[in-house]
Image: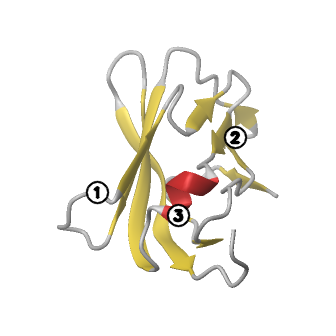
Amino acid sequence: MATEISTLPANINYTLVKGDTWLPGTITADINGTPINFTGYSAKLEIRPNLSGSPTKTLTSPSSGITLSSSGVITLTMTAAETNAIPVGEYKYDLQITSGAGAVRTYSYGTITIVTDVTAN
């Protein structure tokens, strides 16, 4: 599944199964149809139980769950062990991307709902 965003921030909600590998697809960011070149950028996504709570999980680029490409593609991932460590429930998140010059933009926000895995791993 690919999501294209051109209006920031985009409200994107996710549901994932506790203990499953999370590969929600990609997000492609563009300005007037032209993909954003994320070379030299960094990204951070925090998952929190509420807006004032401490992060339950943090993803970052380039090697901790977020990959940014020169063609505007943002890829999010968590391993099965990482999702298994998050308690079942509904969480808030946002994805912020920082340019090489230090400008910070929120690209997406919403909820991440963790549901129970029925099949034992």
Q: Give the left or right position of residue 99, taking residue 73 as reference.
A: left
Q: Return the residue at label 1.
A: 55
Q: Return the residue at label 3.
A: 84
Q: What's the mark number on residue 107?
A: none
User: In which quarter of the view is residue 102 placed?
Assistant: top left
Outermost residue to the right = 1
Residue 10 position in % (x across, y down): 54, 60
| Image quadrant containing the N terminus | bottom right
Disc nearer the start of the sequence (2/1) = 2
Look at the numbered disc 2 and give the secondary structure of its residue: loop
Look at the numbered disc 1 and give the secondary structure of its residue: loop
Residue 106 position in % (x across, y down): 42, 48
Q: Is residue 85 above or below residue 70?
A: below
Question: What amino acid does circle 3 point to?
Answer: Asn
Residue 71 position in % (x across, y down): 74, 26
For the point 21% across and 60% down, which residue is it?
54
For the point 68% across and 56% down, which residue is it?
21
